[in-house]
Image (cartoon, rainbow, N blue to C red):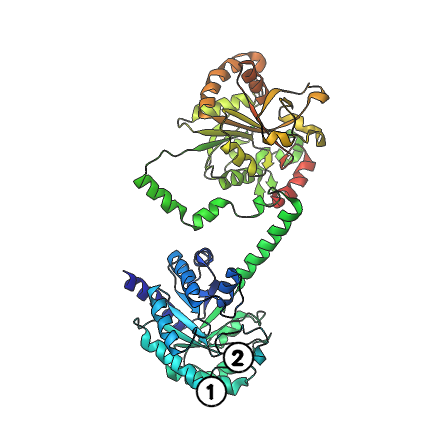
Amino acid sequence: MAVTLQAHQSSQFKKLLLSPQLEFICEAHNGLSAKIVEEAGFRGIWASGLSISAQFGVRDNNEASWTQVLENLEFMADATRIPILLDGDTGYGNFNNMQRLIRKLEQRHIAAVCIEDKLFPKTNSFLNGHAQPMADMEEFCGKIKAGKDAQSDPDFCIIARVEAFICGWGLAEALRRAEAYHQAGADGILIHSALAVPDEILAFKREWGDRCPVVIVPTKYYSTPTDVFRQHDFSIVIWANHMLRAAVASMQTTARILKEEENLLSIEDRIVPVSEVFRLQDAAELLEAEQRYLPKGTERALAIVLAASRGGELGELTEDKPKTMINIHGLPLLGHIVDAYNSVGIKDILVVRGYKKEAVNLPNLTYVDNDAFEETGELKSLFNALQSKEDRFQTTIISYGDVLFNTYIPQTLLQAKDDFVIFVDSNWQEKSSYTRLGGFAECTAPNSRKAFYTQIHLKQLGTAIPPDMIHGVWMGFFKVSAQGVTQLYEILPGILANPAHRKAGMATLFQELLRKNHSIRVLYTVGHWLDMNNLEDVVQAGSFSESF
C-alpha cells in the first residue's frame, strides 16, 4: 500500500514537471497549511525550507535538522494526497547524506526533492547572496548521481537548483552548471534570481531551450505577468513562501489587537471558528469512529428565528419584503443571522414567516408561517414553531429576525445548562429603542466582576421599571432546554387563550414563567449586537457586519 501511494504521488509530480502547460505549486510548511493548499486546488506542494524553519522559529541556515524536517514532512504527507516537492537545501551533507535523504523521503511518500549548489550549512539566497560561495560543480554532480542511484521509485524526481545568478556569477556559469547537473541525472533545473525583474531567468531560458524542464520561483520579480512565463515555456512556477507570510501578518494583527483591547470579542468573528480548524484536522473522521467504537448520543440544537413582522418603521425598505430580508452589506439580514448560528454548529434553523412570506426564501432553512401575523404577536409565532417540530432538541435558542449579533452570544447560550436563559445588555442607556424588544430587566444583581462568579437571575421584565432598578435591557435571545420546551408547551396555550394576550410578546411569557416560580438565568454583555429598529440602524449595520 505504501509503495503504491509513493508511486502514485511521484508519478503525479513527474506529470506536472513534464506537462506541456505551465503548472503551479504552492508553499506549505506543516500538515494544516498543506491541507489548505490542496483544498485550494493546487496539484502540488512546495515544502519550503524557509517556511519550515520559520515555523520552528529558527533561521533558514540548516538550524532545523534534517530529521526534524523529515518529521514535519511526514505530517504534511499524511494530511494530503497531492505530491510534495521538498526544498532540500544542499542535501544536508555530502553524497552519502544525499542517498540516505532520498531513501527517507521515499519512505514518507515525498514525490521529489530540490537541492541547491551551495555549501552546507546553506544560507538563504536573499541574505547577501553575492557573498555566498557556491559548491564545487563536480562534487554537486556526484551528489545528484548518488541520489538517483539511491531512489527505488523510477518516478522520484531530483531538481537541481542553480544559484549562479544569486551568487553573482552570471549567465554563462548558470548555463554551464545547469548542463552539468542535467547530464548527472537531474530531472529538472530550478533557476533562481534575486532581481525585481525576470531578465536573468528569461535570458537563461532562451539559451537553455527545452533540454529539460525549468522551474522558477518569482518571489522577487512578482509583478511579472504570468503569461510571460507561459510564453517562455517554463515548466512549474512555485509560490514559495506566501502561506507563511500571510499567516504571520494575520497572527501579528490578532496578537496586537488582543494586547491592546484585552478581550476576545474584538477578534473572534474576524478569524475562522474553531469548527473550521476541526474540519481541517478531519475531526469528523474521529467522531465517526467514536460512533462506531464508542456509541454515544449526540446533542442537537435548534434555532427559532421570529421574523413574521414587516418592520414598517423602515418605510420603503420593507414595502416588498419583511425587515429580515433587507440588504446588509451584500447579504440579507437573515443571512447574517444564519451564518452566525452556523458558525457555532447550529444547522437546524426554523424561521417563522408572516409579512411577504414568499420573499423569505433562503436555502437550507425550515419555514413555518404565521398567516395571522397582523392580529397576533410573538408568542403565537413561537407556539407555531414549537408545534411544527416533531424532533426534540437538547437546546433551543429563540431570537428575532432583525437583530445582528456576535457569535459568542449563541455559543455562550449553548453552554448554559439552565432550563431558561436570557442575555441582558447592561449598557441599556445608550439606546432608548432597545425597549422594543420587550423592556428593561431587573435582575438579582447588576453587571459587575462579581457576575462572573455567581449566577444572576431575572426578577422582572417590562417597560415600567423605575430607572434605579434597571440592570439592563433584554437583547432578544432566549435559550430553552429540552425540559424547558416541555414547560413552554404547558404554559403557552393558557397565555394565548386569553384574548388580552392575543398580541403578546416574549415579555409576557417571561413574566408568566416567573409567576410560576421558574428561574430565568441572566447572562450579561455590553454591546456586540444591533437591533434594526430604524434607518439609522440599517446604516450602522453595514459597519457592524464588517467588524464581526
Residue 242 percent across, percent down from the top left: 53, 63
In the image, taking residue 12 as reference, residue 534 lies left or right, namely right
Mark with earlier residue (2, 1): 1
For image coordinates 46% across by 24% down, the residue present is 386
Per the image, label 2 sits on a secondary structure element best described as helix
Q: Circle 2 is placed at which residue position?
A: 202
Q: Amino acid at mark 1?
A: Arg
Q: Amino acid at mark 2?
A: Leu
Which of discs 2 and 1 lies nearer the camera? The answer is 1
Residue 504 percent across, percent down from the top left: 58, 19
Residue 437 occupies which quadrant of the picture?
A: top right
Residue 68 occupies which quadrant of the picture?
A: bottom left
The disc placed on residue 221 is none
Q: Is 118 rendered above or below residue 457?
A: below
How many tags in the picture? 2
In the image, taking residue 542 as reference, residue 480 lies left or right, namely left
Residue 21 percent across, percent down from the top left: 43, 71
Viewer-side residue, 527 vs 303:
527
Q: Is residue 44 visible from the viewing direction of this image? A: no
Residue 455 percent across, percent down from the top left: 57, 26
Q: Circle 1 is placed at which residue position?
A: 176
Quadrant showing the C terminus: top right
Q: Is residue 511 visible from the viewing direction of this image? A: yes
